[in-house]
Image (cartoon, helix red, strand yellow):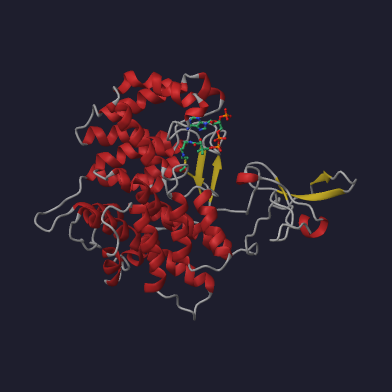
């Protein structure tokens, strides 16, 4: 939004520099410092980008204080309740929810591309069977650039729009392939008559020797999990993908970089870490083991963190965690797992943590990863695959963000500066300059 307001930066040498306000629809104002170094030779220092807005974006909005997340203006609660995942994908990519005809056309387009080149399975065979699925996924997605060359007669923007559909269509196939390879099962081809989530579950769990029908509650829960993980503004992996796109990288390779970033335990890998933590606690005595665990978490030099708790942006309850907690109840009931000990333990851990001064003072609440592993496990998804499911869901957000950048007049190579803290110039023979 246009603004005539300015802030002023006063430097020790007396210079007073006017900075133009950049206002959004909601949230904190920014001040334009993009030409500060060029004009004044001054850098801003912000490790971890804690106070830096790297772009203007219309894709999603997070209000961390009030616990609000909206995609293209629609609250996540309504999207999870009223839409399916591919409708949300169309919303994120095109900016509006599809009408009936657009919905059908988009779904037709995605289902046309669900197969992957047969040679991809040869590539898969080169991996060790015990490799982590995220490592395999980074390799397979990056390799798509070699299998699906871009149509150079199209504009760069058009190539990326087409790649978005291809990638959305192929991600479930690739994730399921990585899983089946690790357990030594034959690969199952996609079934385009099924919904996105049902097709994925079939590719994951169907065996050639018997009929397979995914449980409707599992399909519904997975579809919601995909919606809730589809987009989350300028997080670490999205920033990685935007950065790659700013350099003109191939869309598949940009997404592969996003997957690599997402795999970290401080980011998407936290869902796996959270479930492993709950498993460990259960083995150590369940609810009885919580007080000692909380004590260790609070002891800084123990290096133990409560996985699935805390968030850089949310300083209140992550709205996604609240919805996923509800999905846990619904799904576990439907599957006859009402008294699931892991879920009971998670609920109790949350209760105890939220009454503890340490967590209250620091505004640490459950994030999206705290309960999502419980849903995924109930569906039958093995723990090492959790982050790959997250990557599958987030692919659309990465594309929506990357394509927004490529289509904006803000597009330029992303290149942060640094404050150099190393050795002064010196010669290899030990002499000083
Ligand atoms: N357990 C214990 N203490 C925590 C936790 C946690 N999960 N999270 C933050 N803290 C404490 C920190 O020790 C720090 O305490 P201090 O002020 O006494 O030094 C304070 O809270 C602030 O934490 P920071 O790490 O500075 O906050 P930041 O915004 O950088 O970190 C992060 C956010 C990385 C998500 C952090 O909360 C964390 O490590 N959580 C666990 C991992 C996790 O669940 N990640 C998933 C995030 S959601 C996502 O990426 C999809």
Quadrant of the image containing the C terminus: bottom right
In the foreground, 344 or 108: 344
- Which percent across, then down, holds residue 74? 49, 46
Q: Residue at x 48, y 62 (%)?
A: 254
In the foreground, 403 or 139: 139
Q: Toward which corner of the image does residue 87 lie, by quadrant?
A: bottom left
Q: Toward which corner of the image does residue 294 lie, by quadrant?
A: top left
Q: Is residue 421 left or right of residue 176?
A: right
Q: In this view, which residue lies farthest toward the front?
A: 429
For residue 115, above or below residue 332: below
Q: Residue at x 32, y 18 (%)?
A: 288
- Which percent across, then down, holds residue 68? 52, 38
For residue 409, above or below residue 277: below
Q: In this view, which residue lies farthest toward the left?
A: 209
- Which percent across, then down, holds residue 422? 69, 50
Q: Is residue 29 left or right of residue 146?
A: right
Is any part of residue 101 visible from this angle?
A: no
Figure disc tally: 0
Is any part of residue 287 visible from this angle?
A: yes
Q: Is residue 50 left or right of residue 69?
A: right
Q: Is residue 166 left or right of residue 341?
A: right
Q: In this view, which residue lies farthest toward the right?
A: 14
- Which percent across, then down, holds residue 338? 23, 29
For residue 251, above or below residue 358: below
Q: Residue at x 39, y 67 (%)?
A: 143
Q: Residue at x 27, y 69 (%)?
A: 122
């Amino acid at each position: 939004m246009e603004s005539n307001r300015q802030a002023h930066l006063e430097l020790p040498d007396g210079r007073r520099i006017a900075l133009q306000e950049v206002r959004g629809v909601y949230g904190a104002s920014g001040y334009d410092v993009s030409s500060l170094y060029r004009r004044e030779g001054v850098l801003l220092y912000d490790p971890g980008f804690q106070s830096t807005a790297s772009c203007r974006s219309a894709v999603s909005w997070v209000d961390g204080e009030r616990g609000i997340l909206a995609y293209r203006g629609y609250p996540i609660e309504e999207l999870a309740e009223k839409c399916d995942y591919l409708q949300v994908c169309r919303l994120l990519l095109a900016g509006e929810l599809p009408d009936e005809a657009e919905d059908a056309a988009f779904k037709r387009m995605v289902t046309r591309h669900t197969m992957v080149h047969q040679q991809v399975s040869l590539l898969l065979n080169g991996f060790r069977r015990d490799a982590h699925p995220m490592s395999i996924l980074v390799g397979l997605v990056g390799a798509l650039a070699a299998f699906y060359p871009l149509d150079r007669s199209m504009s760069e923007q058009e190539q990326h729009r087409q790649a978005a559909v291809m990638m959305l269509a192929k991600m479930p196939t690739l994730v399921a392939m990585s899983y089946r390879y690790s357990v030594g099962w034959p690969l199952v081809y996609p079934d385009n008559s099924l919904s996105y989530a049902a097709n994925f579950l079939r590719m994951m769990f169907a065996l050639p020797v018997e009929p397979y029908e995914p449980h409707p509650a599992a399909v519904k829960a997975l579809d919601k999990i995909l919606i809730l993980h589809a987009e989350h503004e300028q997080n670490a992996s999205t920033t990685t993908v935007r950065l790659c796109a700013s350099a003109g990288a191939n869309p598949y390779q940009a997404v592969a970089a996003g997957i690599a970033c997402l795999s970290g335990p401080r980011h998407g890998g936290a869902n796996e870490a959270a479930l492993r933590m709950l498993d460990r606690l259960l083995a150590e005595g369940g609810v009885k083991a919580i007080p000692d665990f909380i004590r260790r978490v609070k002891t800084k030099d123990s290096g133990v963190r409560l996985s699935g708790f805390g968030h850089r942006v949310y300083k209140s309850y992550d709205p996604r965690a609240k919805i996923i907690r509800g999905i846990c109840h619904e799904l576990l009931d439907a599957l006859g797992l009402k008294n699931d000990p892991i879920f009971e333990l998670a609920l109790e851990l949350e209760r105890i943590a939220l009454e503890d001064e340490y967590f209250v003072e620091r505004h640490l609440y459950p994030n999206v990863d705290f309960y999502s592993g419980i849903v995924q496990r109930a569906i039958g998804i093995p723990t090492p695959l959790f982050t790959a499911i997250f990557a599958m869901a987030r692919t659309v957000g990465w594309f929506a963000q990357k394509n927004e950048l490529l289509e904006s007049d803000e597009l330029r190579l992303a290149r942060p500066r640094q404050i150099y803290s190393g050795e002064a110039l010196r010669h290899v023979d030990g002499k000083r300059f």
